[in-house]
Amino acid sequence: MMNDTVYLTILFDYYESLLSDRDRSCFRDYYFSNLSLSEIALASGVSRNAIHKRLKKICDELYLYESKLGLYEKEKKIMGLIHDEVLKEKIKEIL
């Protein structure tokens, strides 16, 4: 089974445009820049708990988007059916 953090970052790649600028920034700070909740809270001028709640909301949204749209699962299924590496790369460009 895939690590939740890895799975969330993959989902973020698919659905980040559906999030607000503030939510994208918060997610990037925590998951990609490895900032602590306290560091993000200080920079944002809110409490650590507010950042924790926002990240929970963002993660829930990403899971919801995948459950409704299924873009990641569909790509995995398509790529599993294709054995030609050049064709796989061309499809990835389109997706």
Image (spheres, grey):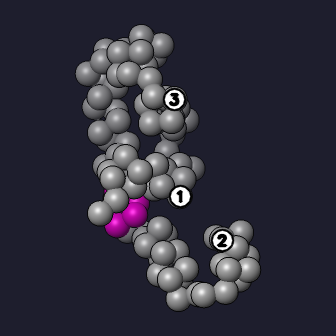
Residue type at mark 1 is: Tyr
Position above or below: 80 against 46: below
Q: Does the image show residue 9?
A: yes
The quarter holding residue 85 reads: bottom right
Q: Main secondary structure of the magenta part?
A: helix
* Label number found at residue 14: 1
Residue 64 is inside the magenta segment? yes
- Pick the quarter of the image with the N terminus: bottom left
Position above or below: 35 against 25: above
- Pick the quarter of the image with the C terminus: bottom right
* Label number found at residue 87: none
Front position in the image: 26 or 88: 88
Q: Residue at x 54, y 53 (%)?
A: 13
Question: Whole-Å distance between the Cαs marked 3 and 1?
Answer: 19 Å
Residue 11 is inside the magenta segment? no
The quarter holding residue 51 reads: top left
Front position in the image: 93 or 62: 93
Magenta residues span: 63-67
Question: Whole-Å distance between the Cαs marked 3 and 2?
Answer: 26 Å
Q: Which residue in the protein does label 2 denote?
A: 92
Category of crowding for the residue at label 2, using alpha-carbon neighbours closer than 10 angstroms: few (below 14), some (14–19), many (at least 20) = few
Residue type at mark 3 is: Ser
Q: Which residue in the protein does label 3 denote?
A: 33
Q: Earlier in the sequence, mark 3 or mark 2?
A: 3
